[in-house]
Image (tube, grey):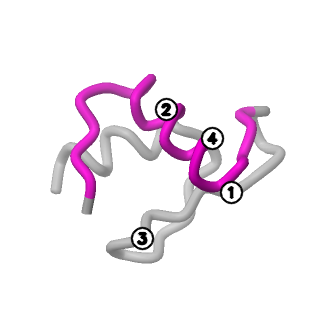
């Protein structure tokens, strides 16, 4: 799994790889390692760095 140094790097990765745009509450972002869903990167990023 890739390491993300900050939230912006994570946003760029998801946008480039998955074509997702960040409009709060318009998409769910899935953590690939645990399969949990997150409403936005503000919620996803702390989850990723805590692992």
Q: Position of residue 1 (x, y in %)?
A: 25, 63
Decide if residue 45 is on the left or right side of residue 17: left
| Magenta residues (range) | 2-22
User: Which residue in the structure is indicated by mark 3?
Assistant: 32
Dot 2 alpha-carbon crowd within 10 angstroms: few under 14, some 14 to 19, many 20 or more: few
Give the CA distance from mark 1 to mark 4.
Answer: 13 Å
- Badge 4 element: helix
Q: Which mark is residue 5?
A: none
Residue at 46% x, 76% y is 35
Give the CA distance from mark 3 to mark 2.
Answer: 16 Å
User: Which residue in the structure is indicated by mark 2?
Assistant: 42
Dot 1 alpha-carbon crowd within 10 angstroms: few under 14, some 14 to 19, many 20 or more: some
Give the CA distance from mark 2 to mark 1.
Answer: 12 Å
Give the CA distance from mark 3 to mark 4.
Answer: 15 Å
Q: Residue furthest left?
A: 51
Q: Earlier in the sequence, mark 3 or mark 4?
A: 4
**Discs 4, 2 touching: Cβ within 8 Å:** no
Residue at 42% x, 70% y is 32
In the rendered image, the vertical position of residue 37 relative to residue 12, given as above or below = below
Residue at 54% x, 64% y is 30
Q: Earlier in the sequence, mark 1 or mark 4?
A: 4
User: Which residue in the structure is indicated by mark 4?
Assistant: 15
Q: How many marks?
A: 4
- Say whether residue 17 is magenta: yes
Q: Earlier in the sequence, mark 2 or mark 1?
A: 1
- Badge 1 element: loop
Q: Position of residue 51 (x, y in %)?
A: 16, 57
Q: Position of residue 15 (x, y in %)?
A: 63, 41
Q: Earlier in the sequence, mark 3 or mark 2?
A: 3
User: Which residue in the structure is indicated by mark 1?
Assistant: 28
* Residue nearest the observer in this picture, 13 or 29: 13
- Badge 3 element: loop
């Amino acid at each position: 799994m890739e390491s993300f140094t900050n939230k912006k790097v994570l946003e760029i990765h998801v946008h480039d790889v998955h074509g997702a745009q960040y409009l709060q509450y318009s998409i769910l972002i899935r953590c690939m390692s645990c399969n949990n869903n997150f409403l936005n990167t503000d919620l996803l990023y702390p989850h990723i760095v805590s692992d």
